[in-house]
Image (cartoon, rainbow, N blue to C red):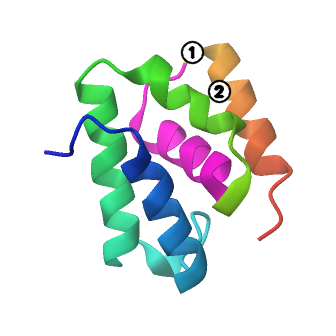
Amino acid sequence: MYPQRNDSFLYTCKENFFLGIHPLSVDVISLEGYQTLVEISKAFFREGRYELFLNYLQEGKYLCDVWAAHLILKFGNPDASVLAECEKVIGRAEL
């Protein structure tokens, strides 16, 4: 569904940031920007690019790390170490 380029996740996080769409806000779930990131993350997981997606946990700009952690927890299948890292990222998030 999405191109092989990894930057679509980053660009969508940036767009969402400037539109005020933040990953931990419950009132944004139905918005297009939120749904786009859901589809991108599901594509990563479905295509077996889970390890590549985990790299976004290190990208703090435009809340990419928080988006990644949120989407991994919601739609991924994290092991204990990834779960701990996601919780750490979300715990230090200032939205």
Q: Residue 13: within the magenta?
A: no
Question: Based on the displayed image, in which of its 4 quarters is residue 76 positioned?
Answer: top left
Residues at circles 2 and 1 in contact by the CB criterion of under 8 Å: yes
Quadrant for the C terminus in the image: bottom right
Q: Amino acid at mark 2?
A: Leu
Mark 1 neighbour density, 10 Å: few (under 14) some (14–19) many (20 or more): few
Residue 20 in view in this figure: no
- Residue 29 higher or lower than 38, as above or below: below
Q: What is the quadrant of residue 29 in the picture?
A: bottom left
Q: Position of residue 50 (x, y in %)?
A: 42, 22
Indicate whether residue 72 is drawn in magenta: yes
Nearer to the camera, 69 or 5: 5
Q: Secondary structure at mark 1?
A: loop
Mark 2, residues whose alpha carbon is within 10 Å: few (<14), some, or many (≥20)?
Answer: some
Where on the picture, by quarter, is residue 34? Answer: bottom left
Q: Residue at x 68, y 43 (%)?
A: 59
Query: What amino acid does circle 1 point to?
Result: Asp
Which residue is pictured at 53% across the width and 39% down the height? 73
Q: Which residues are magenta?
A: 63-78
- Estimate the spatial distance between the alpha carbons at disc 2 and disc 1, rounded to whole Å: 6 Å
Which of the image's four quarters has the N terminus?
Answer: top left
Total number of numbered discs in the rendering:
2
Q: Which of the labelled discs sits on residue 83, or is there none?
A: 2
Q: Is residue 2 left or right of residue 44?
A: left
Judged from the image, the secondary structure of the residue bearing numbered disc 2 is helix
The percent coordinates of residue 20 (x first, y second) are: 58, 83
Q: Main secondary structure of the magenta part?
A: helix
Q: Which residue is mark 1?
A: 79
